[in-house]
Amino acid sequence: MTKDIKNKTRRDFIKTAAAGSAVVAAGITGFPHILKAASPVKVGIVHPVTGWAQYSGSQCRFGAQLALTEINAAGGIKSLGGAMLEAYLGDAQSKAEVGAAEVEKFNEAGVSAIVGAYASNICLATTQAAAKHGIPHVVDVGVNDKIVGRGLTNTFRFGPGFGIITKAGVEGFLAVNKAAGSPTKRVVIVNENTTGFGAGIAGLMTKGLKPAGIEVVEVLSHPTPNKDFRNIALKIKEINPDVVIPSHYYNEGVLFLRTLQRQKIQPKAIYSVLGGASSQYRFLSEFPDAAQYVMDCNHWFDPNNATAATARNKTEAAGKHFSYEVFLAYTAMKFTAAAIEQAGSADRAKITEAMASSNWSDHFMPYGPTKMVNGQNVGARPLVTQIQGKEINVIAPSEYAIAKAVFPRPA
Amino acid sequence: MDFLGINIPTYGWETILGSAISGVFLGSIYALVALGLTLIYGVLHIINFAHGALLMLAMYAVFYLWQYLGIDPYLAMFIVVPGGFLFGYGLQRTVIGKASHGKDEIILLVTLGVSIIIENAALFFFSATERSVRVPYDLDGIDLGVTYVVYPELAALGGSLLVTLGLWLFMTRTDTGKAIRAVAKERQGARLVGINVDHIFAVTFGIGVACVAVAASLLVPTYAVHPQVGYLFVLIAFTVVVLGGMGSFVGALVGGFLIGITEQLGRLYLGESLGVITISVIFILVLLFRPTGLFGQKSG
């Protein structure tokens, strides 16, 4: 049956108009995902893709983008009607102040959350800048504990900080040392002192090893970047420690380990804590001889988790190495997406709330379900790895170990 | 040991001597980079801000020749040095010379602009990833007892000595060298006696870039290549040029060794971060007592 418009009564008109108004109102205030395409959720991704940290920053950017692509390919944010995540990329140029300036740009662009910013000093600046605007900021790599220790309610770190890492590093080393009959009496720490993380680790390691009767004979600090390690190698040669414990970034890690190799300096072990290069597939592929038997207490994925292997395959298919920068930024982005999903909103405050109360567990890191306390995921932990042949194997703690430590290393 | 309230660590003589020797090798690298810089300054009177970017570009050329054609970095010199000369010649003739209109202050900005373009192009085309060359003789060398010297370091030392000698012979024994010196002394006078000044400018810039190409071939077996690598050396190379005397090859060589040794000993005693200030201290001292640099000549 059809109705002629001329025969419409006033009641018919009011009914139709009311229904039409309801549809329009729903479009504005409710059910937006039913009636129109969901607006994308803007996410700022800031890393140092130029300057001294450019390699690591680029790796981080790749990891974050890989996660973002996967999330969008899987249908985006379901609670927002399949809203896509839209990346806003920033380059911190390896400078803290530039990182902070990028956050200001993100704010003007209206991002809902930020993922970044690799180095501790840059993270300190970007989280501070994000706090001014109430933007939730997920720190991917920066391990300085001050990042989450300043009471900034917008700042979250999914991975561990250097306090947790150093504690695990000491425990891991003592376990490895004990299993070998405790041959270590004297160690030398080599650390970077430009961005703050290396110096922090050196202090905590010294405190942690002392009760076990292991003397830290000398702490040899260096700036980042550093183009020459010959003096440090000469000092190590003169001190002749049992074990050398380095903490620095990738480039310095490679140069340091190659210098030791060139100078024919072979302590019983190189046991890095956040060693930069010490658990990197790239270092292993480029300098397999220098890399052999190097141990590292660092960010690492659960070696028994199948999704980690999938992410590694995707990364390698893209011509990249599956480094800690990649999988930490990847996980940080996934955590961010999970929080947006949980919040069901692109609103910064609601996402912040969701991050603080998150119990997200769909990840491949050895952290268990997420539990944020003052912005730090308290379940986050590092693993101890050792380069053995063509693989990087987890050697501690025992629940994740897939190989036994080779210590002291063969001459 | 306590000196003026500062705790100075004590080391065995082997460590001190080893550090000084490593300073000689580090200094030879500074000298290599500084040689091209001092040549360009000595003749063109311009501070070439693109020097670091050109070094980086040459290092990439050496790396890719090794990666795709399997050419050893030292043999790559036979390709990158002529290539560097032609590139430098063309750059001066078509970009720097034309854009500067003969004004020094504009040349400075043009070279700065060139460096920014080259660095960003490198970042775009080669990405930020550091690339390293692996050569079979990478770990071979001579054990000096106090330190182990690998062949790539010896090659860099020999290279800096040979390039200095070569440049000196070229400038004093060849007609082109004499023409370059004439242009450096008196541009207008050189033009009046029939020297093609624009051509000599471009030749000089080309030789400067060729020197950088030699440095690149000698550096690649030791240092990773990335878009920022030029900065590691070129800032200190500027110091070496001023310290040794602007335009002086011997000055660049001696200045390089002096800075290298000072830097290494400074780092040994004052630490890796603070030790670098010894470069500034010796630089200021030389300028105070000999403003023209160690081997520089007074103008006029």
Image (cartoon, coloured by chain):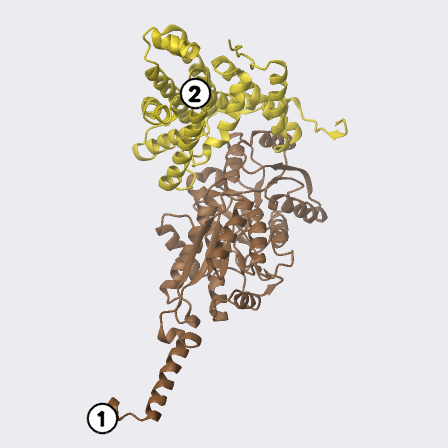
> In the rendered picture, chain B carries what hue?
yellow
Q: Is residue B63 left or right of residue A98?
A: left
> In the rendered picture, chain A carries what hue?
brown
Using the numbered discs, state the Cα–Cα distance from disc 2 to disc 1 in whole angstroms.
92 Å
Q: Is residue A345 visible to us here?
A: yes
Tell me what residue is drawn at x 48 percent, y 51 percent: A46
* Whole-percent x, y for residue B139 in the image: 46, 29
Mark 2 residue crowding within 10 angstroms, few (<14) / some (14–19) / many (20+)? many
* Whole-percent x, y for residue A112 in the image: 49, 62
> Badge 1 is on which residue?
A1
Tell me what residue is drawn at x 55 percent, y 65 percent: A352
Label 1 marks a residue whose chain is A
> Badge 2 is on which residue?
B36
Which quadrant of the rendered structure holds the N terminus of chain B?
A: top right
Residue type highlighted by circle 2: Gly
Residue type highlighted by circle 1: Met
